Image (tube, rainbow, N blue to C red):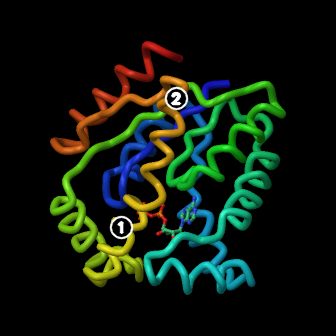
Amino acid sequence: MFNLILFGPPGSGKGTQSENIIANYGLQHLSTGNLLRTEIANQTTLGLQAKQLMDQGQLVPDEVVIGMVGNFMDAHREAKGFLFDGFPRTTAQCVALDALLKQKSNEINVVLALEVSEEELVKRLLGRGATSGRSDDINESIIRARIKEYHDKTTAVATYYQQFDKVVHIKGEGTVESIYADLKAEIDTRI
Ligand code: ADP
């Protein structure tokens, strides 16, 4: 298996670049944001609880997200690898993911970290909110709250994987094609 984490703040282009990567390498896309939005659309209990937090720019509790990821991985046992997008977002999620992969004698091969300035992130997310209907992308103060959550809790994810020398930083500004070329070069040396 080849397991990759695409890491970066909200609006850094993880969704867009994930599509390119899964199309090219046949990895299974695992986006916790998408899984949570499906739960919301289906009006499940989990979805209703998650929506309140998501709409305030806060993280959903670790145990909820970890359970959801475990179920998804079980449902895709045939996958030749996973592309994790929006997960892990906390150190506890990193530890849980390592344990889930270890059960399958697997590990994270690389963490590709997209770097984008805060002003560019806010601009992109407000632009996306104008067309996507995503309720967490409409209001600038919620967007800034999500970026703050990222700095408060999620940057610890990079620190966690740095201790295993797995993090590669990629500039997330420029054209979609040029950023993808940089990501692809890093994947190709490892896959
Ligand atoms: P973004 O575009 O902000 O990166 P996502 O689509 O990945 O957002 O996630 C949207 C929201 O879903 C997050 O702001 C958070 O509330 C919740 N969420 C997604 N993934 C996780 C996770 N791994 N842990 C906790 N909350 C999560």
Residue at (42, 66) in percent of width and height: 149
Please indicate whether residue 143 sits to the left or right of residue 136 in the image. left
Q: At label 2, which amino acid type do we have?
A: Gln
Q: Secondary structure at mark 1?
A: helix
Q: Residues within 10 Å of mark 2 (few under 14, many from 20)?
A: few
Q: Earlier in the sequence, mark 2 or mark 1?
A: 1
Q: Quadrant of residue 40?
A: bottom right
Residue at (73, 82) in percent of width and height: 44
Between 23 and 165, the residue placed more toward the observer is 165
> x%, y% of residue 58?
49, 75
Q: Would you name the residue on which mark 2 appears?
A: 163
Count the marks.
Answer: 2
Q: At label 1, which amino acid type do we have?
A: Lys
> x%, y% of residue 120?
17, 59
Q: Secondary structure at mark 2?
A: loop
Q: Which mark is residue 148?
A: 1
> x%, y% of residue 85?
51, 49
Please indicate whether residue 48 sits to the left or right of residue 152 in the image. right
Please indicate whether residue 103 sits to the left or right of residue 86 in the image. right
Q: Quadrant of residue 140?
A: bottom left
Please indicate whether residue 5 sits to the left or right of residue 46 in the image. left
Residue at (53, 55) in percent of width and height: 89
Work out whether 42 lies above or below 85: below
Quarter of the picture holding the N terminus: top right
Distance of mark 2 from mark 1, alpha carbons?
A: 24 Å
Q: Nearer the viewer, mark 2 or mark 1?
A: 2
Residue at (33, 42) in percent of width and height: 114
